[in-house]
Image (cartoon, rainbow, N blue to C red):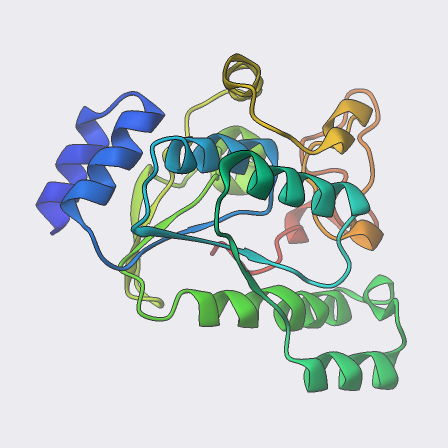
Amino acid sequence: MENRIKEIVNKSEKINDSILEISKNFPENIVFSTSFGIEDQVISHAIFSQNITNIAVFTLDTGRLFPETYAVWDKTLLQYKATIKAYYPNNDKVENYVNTNSINAFYNSVELRKECCFIRKVEPLNRALQGAKIWITGLRAEQSENRNSIQKLEWDEQRQLYKYNPLLNWTTAEVVNYLKKHGVPYNTLHDSNFVSIGCAPCTRALKEGEDFRAGRWWWEDQSKKECGLHR
């Protein structure tokens, strides 16, 4: 499996071709996680426009997303007549967190923020990835310094699967041009200088000259700005 998947990843330069080849050669246990950002919409189009049915597409609904995120979610389902499975956080854990710490406790410390991320994102992701052999993501190296060292194809030792990042070397301009060319729906917050879009209380628009990730958890030190989804 390792040699074949590496061959496909290294050979296929076009996103539609690489996704199609992955699906043909590994017909089982492939998943794609979308948060409906512009990168994820590129991959969603590559899957849905080619009627690839053996890649399970899923999203994590934290319960605190922007209305605009739900809107592009709905538009994507309607445009492609697609199936996107939603995973939700454990209700008891959310209740306990809020009742113990308060509704916006994540502003109070890095530890409380990471606990909230774990409950609302990491634990549901772990459930979504159970049994998967290949996990397709929309990660790009341009997104943050922490992601400069990742590879197009990686082995996730903890989750025991291959992580495929087909857009790793794409620029933002290339992503935007692809969406325009193919008429792909996108989150309208991107038009208001929101670049990396997560939960509403933890995301703001970028100011001129700010780093790509500056709009996420802006009250924390730059080096701590990951939520645990991507190690």
Please indicate whether residue 97 sits to the left or right of residue 73 in the image: right
Please indicate whether residue 221 sits to the left or right of residue 181 in the image: right
Residue drawn at (47%, 37%) of the image:
44
Q: Residue 59 at x, y = what percent? A: 55, 55
Q: Residue 176 at x, y = what percent? A: 58, 19
Q: Nearer the viewer, residue 123 or 183?
A: 183
For the question of whether residue 92 can be seen, the reply is: yes
For the question of whether residue 148 can be seen, the reply is: no
In the image, is residue 148 above or below residue 223? above
In the image, is residue 63 above or below residue 79? below
Q: Residue 56 at x, y = what percent? A: 38, 54
Residue drawn at (70%, 30%) of the image:
211
Please indicate whether residue 78 sits to the left or right of residue 204 in the image: left
The picture quadrant where one finds residue 21 is top left
Q: Nearer the viewer, residue 220 or 51?
A: 51
Residue drawn at (33%, 27%) of the image:
16
* Callout count: 0
In the image, is residue 64 above or below residue 17? below
Q: Residue 166 at x, y = what percent? A: 36, 34
Residue drawn at (44%, 35%) of the image:
43
